[in-house]
Amino acid sequence: MKPATDPLTDRWHAIRSRQRELITDAVIAAVTGHPQETVTVSTVALIARISRKTFYKYFRSLDEAMAFAAETALRGIGLPAPETLAGQTGRERFLATIEGMMLSGLAQPELLRFLSHFDFAFRGNLAPEVERSFSLSVEKLYQGVGETFLEGQRDGSIRADLDPVLTVATAGNAALGLVQRIVSFPLDAELEAIARLELEAWGNLLAPVEAALPSR
């Protein structure tokens, strides 16, 4: 039997969660809406319609808020539901996951714009403890992608000689980087064709040599 919950406590938790969400949305809006301007706590507070004091109740610094917003954006891009990948080989599941990230990113261009700006303008200047925390969060967030890769190596659909960590990171960065280009240059029709070719190329690269050779 579950212990009874306190309605007042639940309400406060909901309020705090909503406030944190508002601040996160404001961080993303500040970066994507004014990419040439310096983002400050005052800017974020103004967009979120809160005081600086309220901001600091939820985040110790702008760095921490930026990293949390980046983690939220990555989570928002999301991954395909496991049940939709049932019955496939590890390689098929891995490629479907990468494709799902690309499609989700295309559907939410503001999150990609934020992540792109975060990577180039903010991440290199994060406080060491914030960077460590962010890196661990991202690692946990995308652990499932690595699992599909390892599954492919176990079932023989992915080459055993490929380094899992390096290959997964390279595939993910390449996919999101290409989608960021598509979002930045929406009139370039060739980019979508390149995206399809990239997935095909990854499929061939991952496949064991005998599976990648054309049938005679």
Image (tube, rainbow, N blue to C red):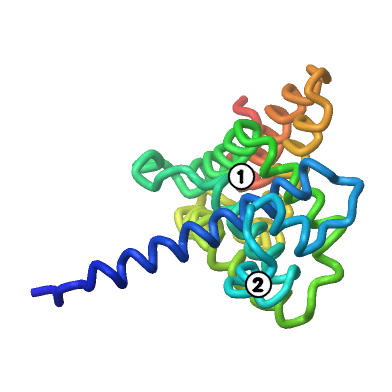
Q: Is any part of residue 135 visible from this angle? A: no
Q: Which residue is mark 1?
A: 207
Locate the C terminus by quadrant: top right
Locate the N terminus by quadrant: bottom left
Q: Quadrant of residue 193?
A: top right
Above/below status of 64 relative to 142: below
- Residue 23's x, y, as percent? 62, 58
Left or right: residue 1 versus residue 129 is left
Nearer to us in this view, 108 or 154: 108
The kind of secondary structure element at disc 1 is: loop
Q: Identify which residue is drawn at 72% across, 30% down.
A: 195
Nearer to us in this view, 46 or 86: 46
Nearer to us in this view, 13 or 179: 13
Mark 2 Cα-neighbour bin, 10 Å: few <14, some 14–19, many ≥20? few
- Residue 53's x, y, as percent? 65, 72
Q: Which mark is residue 144?
A: none
Q: Identify which residue is drawn at 82% across, 57% down.
A: 39
Marks 1 and 2, how far apart at CA: 54 Å
Q: Amino acid at mark 2?
A: Lys
**Nearer the camera: disc 1 or disc 2:** 2
Q: Is any part of residue 131 visible from this angle? A: yes
- Mark closest to the chain's N terminus, 1 or 2: 2
The kind of secondary structure element at disc 2 is: helix
Q: Which residue is mark 2?
A: 53
Residue lying at the far bottom of the rendered structure: 129
Above/below status of 41 relative to 57: above
